[in-house]
Amino acid sequence: MPSTNDPLGIQIGAREIYDKLGDVDRKVTDVGGKVDRLSDQHTSLRTEFGDLRAETREAIAELRAETREGHADLESRARVLERGRWPLPSIAALTGVAALIVTLVDLIGKGK
């Protein structure tokens, strides 16, 4: 039967309020536990990402060092090849001069 004090006729007893508060308390506790687990996972992920960042930096440093070494090796090999090339034009010039001398000697020898 509706209460005369409540125009909608709804009555909520103290026991119903207590039960709902108990449900809310359990749900808040569950949410708190989940937040704690998420916080722990976040901390763990931060640590893992920090480790990965450090490993990545080390790998990049190693690659840079290897690249520098490879560049230095290629540079030295190019220098050796360049040093080996310089006599070729000189040899060609000397051969030309020698041929000219032989020709001149032959012409002078025939003219006598």
Image (cartoon, grey):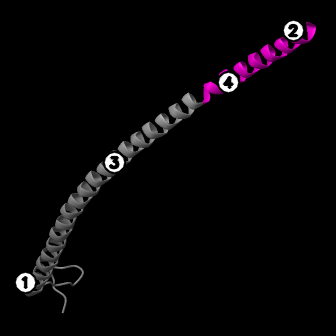
26 relative position to 64: left or right: left
Q: CA distance from mark 4 to mark 3?
A: 45 Å
The number of callouts visible is 4
Picture disc at residue 106: none
Dot 4 and dot 3 residues touching (CB under 8 Å): no
Q: Which residue is mark 1?
A: 14
Q: CA distance from mark 1 to mark 2?
A: 139 Å
The C terminus: image quadrant: top right
Q: Which residue is mark 2?
A: 108
Residue 96 % position (x, y): 76, 19
Q: Is residue 98 magenta?
A: yes
The N terminus: image quadrant: bottom left
Q: Earlier in the sequence, mark 1 or mark 3?
A: 1
| Residue extent of the magenta highlight | 85-112
Q: Earlier in the sequence, mark 4 or mark 2?
A: 4
Q: Which residue is mark 3?
A: 62
